[in-house]
Amino acid sequence: MEPQNPVQTARKGPLLWVFAIVFLVLVAFLGGLGVAGWFRAKEEPTPAPLRASSEPIAPPMRQSAPEPPEFRQTAPPAPEMPADVRDWLEFLRGIEAERQELARDQVSRALTTLAALSAGAQLEALQGLLADAGGGDAPTPPSPAQRARMDTEAMRRAWIDLHNKFLSRRPPAECQPIADRYDQVLRETGGMMGDILQAIANAEQDPSSAITVLQAMKGRSRDLIDAPAREADRGVAAICERYGVTKWFAIQTDENGGGIFQRLAF
């Protein structure tokens, strides 16, 4: 065994002490970190565990942009119908009712006369027998044609009176177009009835001429009466709509008024 060098032994001593001090410093440093972390962990609270709730959680409300206000255009209220307009339209309703009634009455009488004329010779023979049975002194009753001639003037007068009654009431300005069209309706209805009655009255003396006149009148009511009647009725409807009033009567055409002249094939 070799004897140790006292110089080397003296050198190793201080080195060991240096290693030992460094080791202790590292241990102290690392240990300090662990202790600090331990204390830090103690100070920070542990988050509470999430608990499942049986109640449903409402979804978050979404804030939407406010809707712009809606602007609705409402129609202004209809103006009130003037009193003079309403009064004249009511007057027109009465005239129209009289026109329809007068035409129906005269057409019925015309049909009766036509039926009597169709009997012809049989009626004349019956009148002769009645005169003989009475000893010849009894007055001979007028024939259907004679009665028709007597009635024609009275029937024409009835239409003239109705037309004058219509003209006696001046319409308001906005009703003037209706009055113009209805004036034609009234004149043509009365004129056509007079022509029919006159033809029937002349049938006994000149049957062929009467037939010619009556045949020429076919379709005349559609052009001269129905067309202006529709225009007048549309005028009444327009005024009622202008004032927000329900239309309460109609100007009848022959087509939708019961076919007064159609019953005579006109």
Image: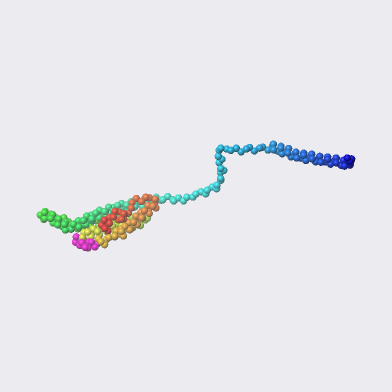
Q: What's drawn in magenta, residue-wise?
A: 204-213
Q: Position of residue 6 (x, y in %)?
A: 89, 40
How many badges with numbers are in the image? 0
Q: Residue at x 52, y 48 (%)?
A: 67
- Could one spot residue 260 in this view of the protein? yes
Task: Give above or below for 57 relative to 210.
Answer: above
Choose between 169 and 250: the one closer to the eye.
250
Q: Residue at x 61, y 38 (%)?
A: 50
Residue furthest left in the image: 135
Q: Quadrant of the C terminus?
A: bottom left
- Could one spot residue 91 in this view of the protein? no
Residue furthest front in the image: 1
Task: Give above or below for 46 relative to 105.
Answer: above
Choose between 185 and 6: the one closer to the eye.
6
The way the protein has been coloured in the rendering is rainbow
Choose between 28 and 164: the one closer to the eye.
28
Quarter residue 206 falls in: bottom left
Residue 250 lies in the magenta stretch: no
Q: Position of residue 184 (x, y in %)?
A: 31, 58
Q: Position of residue 99 (x, y in %)?
A: 28, 54
Task: Give above or below for 212 relative to 130.
Answer: below
Quarter residue 44 falls in: top right
Q: Position of residue 73 (x, y in %)?
A: 46, 51
Q: Decide whether the magenta segment is chiefly helix, strand or loop.
A: helix
Q: Quadrant of the N terminus?
A: top right
Q: Is residue 74 left or right of residue 104?
A: right
Quarter residue 162 falls in: bottom left
